[in-house]
Every structure is written in structure tokens, then in C-alpha cells.
Amino acid sequence: MPTVTQEPADQGPDDRGAADQGLPEIDLVHRAIDHSIDLREAVGRITDPLLHTLADMLLFELGRRLARLEGE
């Protein structure tokens, strides 16, 4: 079974976590949406309906958060 190494939650492999600190939440949500779209495209190639649903739910919730932030 392959092993997975995991970076600390506040740091990515290229240390973007530190660069993201101080960004407005709306910018972070936009960034998360961009990554989630890439995720959805990759998951779309996998034949697992649960993964499709989870990726779609993530995008839906990020869209709701974005709508709330834009309404403020």
C-alpha cells in the first residue's frame, strides 16, 4: 500500500501558507474555488460518484461563502 506524506496544515510544499496570511477572506475563498475547480476536474476522471458529490458540495459551499462575503 502506498504511503502518503502530509505537510503541516499551515504550510504547503512551497510554503504558500505563510504568504496567504493577512489576505482578505474573499481572496482566500477565490483561491480555494480555483483549487476546487481543478480538484473537480481531476475527480471527474475517477468513477466514484461519492467523490463527485463531495467535490461538488465543496464548490457549492465555497460559492455560498463567496456570495455572503460579496454581500457584506
Image (cartoon, helix red, strand yellow):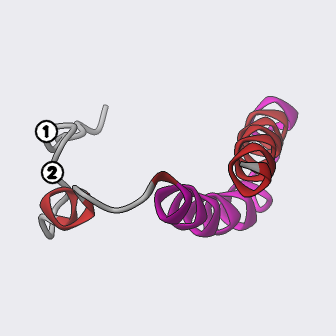
Q: Magenta stretch containing residue 40, yes or no?
A: yes
The answer to whether 35 appears left or right of 20 in the picture is right
Majority SS type along the magenta span: helix
Query: Residues in magenta?
Result: 26-51
Q: Magenta stretch containing residue 38, yes or no?
A: yes
Comparing 67 with 34, the one in front is: 67
Number of numbered discs present? 2
Q: Which mark is residue 70?
A: none
Comparing 23 with 46, the one in front is: 23
Label 2: state its secondary structure. loop
Tell me which amino acid carries mark 1.
Answer: Pro
Q: In this figure, which residue is indicated by the disc labeled 1? A: 8
The answer to whether 18 appears left or right of 35 in the picture is left
Tell me which amino acid carries mark 2.
Answer: Gln
Label 1: state its secondary structure. loop
* Residue 51 point in image, percent of width and height: 74, 37
Residue drawn at (15%, 70%) of the image: 14
Residue 24, compared with residue 59, is above or below; it is below
Q: In this figure, which residue is indicated by the disc labeled 2? A: 11
Q: Could you say which quadrant of the image residue 49 lies in?
A: top right
* Residue 70 point in image, percent of width and height: 74, 57
CA separation in Å, label 2 and label 1: 5 Å
> Could you tell me if the residues under marks 2 and 1 are in contact, i.e. CB atoms within 8 Å?
yes
Residue drawn at (80%, 36%) of the image: 57
Residue drawn at (71%, 42%) of the image: 65
How many C-alpha atoms fall within 10 Å of the one at disc 2: few (<14), some, or many (≥20)? Answer: some
Residue drawn at (71%, 40%) of the image: 58
* Residue 29 point in image, percent of width and height: 56, 55
Q: Could you say which quadrant of the image residue 24 lies in?
A: bottom left
